[in-house]
Image: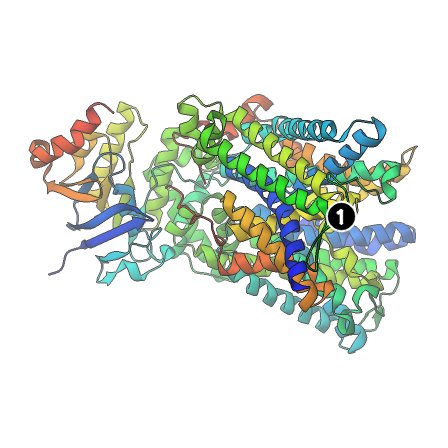
């Protein structure tokens, strides 16, 4: 819907900033590390949700752009001595450009084909990160120095925390404005029906490519945030399992809603901590539990935790007629063939 | 003087299947022109060629002094043509108001997505007012904030129409507006079409199977069978036309 | 050497083709790409080993039992998870994303479950279906297992082609995949057919697992082989059964030749590169039918 930020949205962004500046004085270093990771995941997940939840494009290249953000920022900053903010900006531009580049052919592909093409792109990108020794350090990985922003050194988790929080707050604000803009609504229109969208004058392919580029820029920003509190990157962490983690966050929290995605990030992000705290340390079961949660979430709560939560608050229709209302039962001729 | 809207020698094949073969027709400004024919006659294909979802191999479609075949699908509404959908394509997870706002796309200027500005706020407020006026006109105001997917069937059809009207077309393509409606609802659609044609100066092209509706609102009827035009004329002429009775009513009788 | 590489490429290609067939059967009947197909191959290998070593079954009985269990497993997954997703929670097209994500979830479950079993930490090996000294032709060496793989793959492909075209169930499956609504109208039990398709595809993955496990190192991550199946089916156009077979063989050969002429390091990335290249240049693959326009 058109308009400016609602009070609740404004308060939410403010809360992120306050937490960003207050928590480093209150929590031990280890929790701050987890917090930094979660905020980075949040930026990643919001960007992925733009593609999957908003514009309904089933694309899997997100982690590749995250990688461009990390390597780009780290190499420019550490090796070539470019100031941090400029490095981050340049990486975002490179990622956005790459997003446009694969967005053009990808926008022609439908659903599963798009998923496969982008997945393949991500795997190719990981291969490049792993084998381009002179630039990325190859399979040995790349070490980099803590960035300095206007004289502020971010080497430790505590020092990086406020900066990562500012980045997250900016991304959330931008996304909230996007939700209220014409472009944001066009994304949703494409998700619901490409035919209606193009018959209403929306350049479907153009919007898809634009979404691709924006989502890539967000992923790259997440990568730049990652370099604030890490000092080492290896291509192995940029694989398919990382994508599944982010995807799980989006699906469990509730896609096409910023609050839902943030909730998903917190729930899934704390999962390893919870498993570790269990009596028999269920950590070895982590992979299985991720998968099981993903399947269960999709089967039993398609709108995610946030959707369930909102339903409870609104206490609108009861559960059984809710599912009935969402079914296409009223459609005379449901489309089933591809 | 050239016609308001003219299809010339349109030919469309899907693989080996000829959907439309050497089809020509003209539509007079301000008229309601019905396109009828048995199932699979190619009516929807003609509509899909006009709205550029299909690329015909042959022919031209002239409207407002240009060939529509040079345009892409999203440019058709700016050229002045709106359409509804037979299978109820709606933005199901968006509200009724948002559906109509999407219909207005070409009349809302573009601003930077991430930046608020007073000019943008004014333009968007105006778009909201226009959309609400259209909801008023189509009796949908009460459902303003309902998700489109949650409306009942009759209101969904109405919303499809409201969304198409929001683009302020000069020519409106209606793909089976009465399909699946009850008799009482059909007469409502009937009245609404006549009212719209008059009050907005709309020209309407109509694909429809419900014969009473076609016969009562259409000024002129074109009959398609197996991708070819077999007759054209006023409702009275069509009713008597031997080829139509044979090709159309014959097959409909036991369908 | 090139001839030798080509021949062993054909052998691997036959296995890729089986995995591709498994994917395409599911895709054609439910529109879903089964990202867990590789894990199906993996657990079939482990299952076979378990039946042989632990339960002391003989080889033929093990094959039959493994394929049957895989069939049941696939059908069960369709029934308990996917069917619910299609059933009532999403609009028709929107169900695709959650269904595919569910298969990704399943792949993690399977991988995770196998990894927890202690004995899978060491590299295990399933004995080959056909053993014995290699066969020599001039200066080419052929393993008996390789010849066996080609024979089994060809037999399976022939059986599938005949089954799809000449049996009642095959015809019902094809009807379901082409137009589920019309199929339901003429009395085909569409739900059971979807289950059947998943069962059949999982059984195929089981056969691939038994053929492949003796050739690869068995690890919980062996499921990555799914990308080779996907690449094979994309080359083949994703809708054509014959295309899959040719796609698999082309891929197997290309991979081996790249190993010789470019670098062994590039073998890993070949399938992904091929997927991207084919989808960008020729989205319908070499043998696929053109994507049909959705009816509006």
Question: Where the C terminus of chain A falls, by quadrant?
Answer: top left
Query: What secondary structure is marked by label 1?
Result: loop
Q: Quadrant of residue A308?
A: top right
Foreground residue among B225 and B26: B225
Q: Residues within 10 Å of mark 1 (few under 14, many from 20)?
A: few
Question: Is residue C233 visible in this depiction of the protein?
Answer: yes
| Residue A286 position (above or below residue C256) | above
Residue C184 image point, x, y percent? 44, 25
Task: From the image, tell me which residue sits under label 1.
Answer: C216
| Residue B106 position (above or below residue C112) | below
Residue C244 image point, x, y percent? 55, 47
Q: Quadrant of residue A21?
A: bottom right
Q: Residue at x 58, y 37 (%)?
A: C156
Residue A107 image point, x, y percent? 50, 56
Q: Residue at x 62, y 57 (%)?
A: C253
* Left/right of residue A324 with respect to residue A239 in the rendered view: left
Question: Is residue B196 visible in this depiction of the protein?
Answer: no
Foreground residue among B40 and B82: B40
């Amino acid at each position: 819907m058109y308009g400016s930020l609602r009070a609740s949205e404004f308060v939410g962004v403010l809360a992120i900033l306050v937490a960003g500046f207050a928590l480093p004085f209150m929590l031990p270093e280890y929790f701050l590390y987890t917090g930094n990771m979660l905020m980075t995941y949040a930026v990643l997940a919001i960007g992925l949700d733009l593609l999957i939840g908003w514009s309904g494009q089933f694309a899997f290249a997100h982690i590749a752009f995250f990688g461009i953000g990390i390597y780009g920022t780290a190499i420019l900053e550490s090796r070539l001595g470019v100031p941090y903010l400029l490095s981050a900006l340049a990486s975002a531009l490179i990622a956005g450009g790459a997003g446009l580049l694969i967005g053009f052919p990808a926008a022609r592909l439908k659903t599963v084909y798009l998923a496969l093409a982008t997945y393949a792109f991500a795997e190719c990108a990981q291969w490049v990160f792993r084998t381009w020794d002179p630039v990325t350090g190859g399979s040995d990985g790349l070490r980099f120095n803590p960035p300095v922003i206007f004289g502020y050194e971010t080497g430790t988790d505590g020092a990086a925390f406020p900066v990562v929080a500012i980045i997250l707050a900016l991304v959330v604000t931008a996304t909230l404005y996007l939700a209220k803009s014409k472009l944001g609504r066009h994304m949703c229109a494409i998700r619901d029906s490409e035919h209606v969208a193009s018959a209403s004058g929306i350049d479907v392919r153009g919007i898809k490519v634009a979404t691709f580029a924006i989502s890539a820029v967000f992923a790259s920003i997440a990568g730049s945030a990652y370099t604030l509190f890490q000092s080492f990157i290896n291509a192995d962490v940029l694989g398919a399992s990382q994508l599944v983690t982010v995807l799980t966050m989006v699906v469990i929290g509730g896609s096409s809603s910023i609050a839902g995605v943030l909730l998903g990030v917190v729930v899934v992000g704390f999962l390893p901590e919870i498993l570790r705290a269990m009596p028999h340390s269920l950590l070895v079961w982590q992979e299985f539990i991720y998968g099981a949660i993903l399947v269960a979430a999709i089967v039993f709560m398609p709108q995610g935790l946030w959707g369930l939560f909102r339903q409870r608050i609104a206490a609108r229709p009861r559960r059984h007629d809710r599912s009935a209302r969402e079914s296409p039962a009223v459609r005379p001729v449901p489309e089933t063939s591809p | 003087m050239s016609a308001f809207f003219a299809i010339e020698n349109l030919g469309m094949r899907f693989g080996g299947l000829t959907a439309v073969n050497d089809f020509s027709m003209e539509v007079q400004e301000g008229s309601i022109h019905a396109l009828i024919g048995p199932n699979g006659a190619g009516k929807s294909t003609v509509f899909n060629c006009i709205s550029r979802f299909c690329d015909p191999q042959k022919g031209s479609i002239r409207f407002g002094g240009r060939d529509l075949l040079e345009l892409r699908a999203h440019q058709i509404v700016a050229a002045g043509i709106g359409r509804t959908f037979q299978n109820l394509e709606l933005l199901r997870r968006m509200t009724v108001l948002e559906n109509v706002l999407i219909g207005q796309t070409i009349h809302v200027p573009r601003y930077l997505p991430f930046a608020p500005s007073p000019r943008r706020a004014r333009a968007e407020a105006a778009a909201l007012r226009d959309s609400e006026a259209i909801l008023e006109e189509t009796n949908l105001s009460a459902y303003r904030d309902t998700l489109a997917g949650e409306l009942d069937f009759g209101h969904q059809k109405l919303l499809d129409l409201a969304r198409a009207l929001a683009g302020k077309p000069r020519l409106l393509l209606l793909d089976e507006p009465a399909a699946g409606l009850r008799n009482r609802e059909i007469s409502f659609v009937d009245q609404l079409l006549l009212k719209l044609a008059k009050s907005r100066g709309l020209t309407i092209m109509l694909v429809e199977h419900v014969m009473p509706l076609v016969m009562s609102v259409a000024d002129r009827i074109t009959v398609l069978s197996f991708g070819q035009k077999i007759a054209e004329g006023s409702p009275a002429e069509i009713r008597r036309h031997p080829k139509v009775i044979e090709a159309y009513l014959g097959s409909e009788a036991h369908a | 050497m090139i001839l030798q590489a080509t021949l062993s490429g054909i052998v691997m290609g036959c296995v890729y083709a089986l995995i591709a067939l498994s994917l395409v059967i599911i895709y054609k009947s439910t529109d879903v790409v089964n990202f867990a197909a590789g894990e199906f191959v993996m657990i079939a290998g482990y299952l076979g080993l378990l039946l042989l070593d632990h339960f002391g079954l003989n080889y033929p009985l093990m094959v039959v039992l493994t394929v049957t269990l895989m069939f049941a497993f696939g059908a069960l997954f369709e029934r308990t998870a996917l069917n619910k997703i299609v059933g009532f929670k999403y609009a028709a097209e929107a169900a695709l994303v959650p269904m595919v994500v569910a298969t990704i979830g399943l792949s993690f479950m399977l991988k995770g479950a196998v990894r927890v079993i202690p004995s899978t930490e060491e590299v295990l090996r399933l004995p080959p279906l056909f053993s014995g000294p290699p066969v020599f032709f001039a200066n080419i060496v052929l393993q008996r297992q390789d010849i066996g793989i080609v024979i089994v793959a060809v037999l399976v492909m022939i059986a599938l082609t005949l089954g799809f075209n000449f049996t009642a169930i095959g015809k019902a499956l094809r009807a379901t995949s082409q137009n589920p609504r019309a199929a339901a109208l003429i009395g085909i039990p569409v739900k059971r057919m979807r289950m059947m398709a998943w069962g059949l595809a999982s059984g195929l993955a089981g056969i691939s697992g038994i053929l492949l496990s003796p050739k690869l190192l068995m690890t919980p991550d062996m499921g990555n082989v799914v990308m080779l199946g996907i690449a094979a089916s994309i080359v083949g156009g994703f809708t054509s059964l014959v295309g899959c077979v040719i796609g698999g063989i082309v891929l197997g050969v290309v991979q081996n030749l790249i190993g010789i002429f470019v670098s062994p390091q590039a073998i890993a990335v070949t399938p992904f590169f091929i997927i991207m290249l084919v989808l960008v240049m020729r989205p319908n693959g070499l043998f696929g039918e053109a994507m049909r326009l959705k009816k509006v």
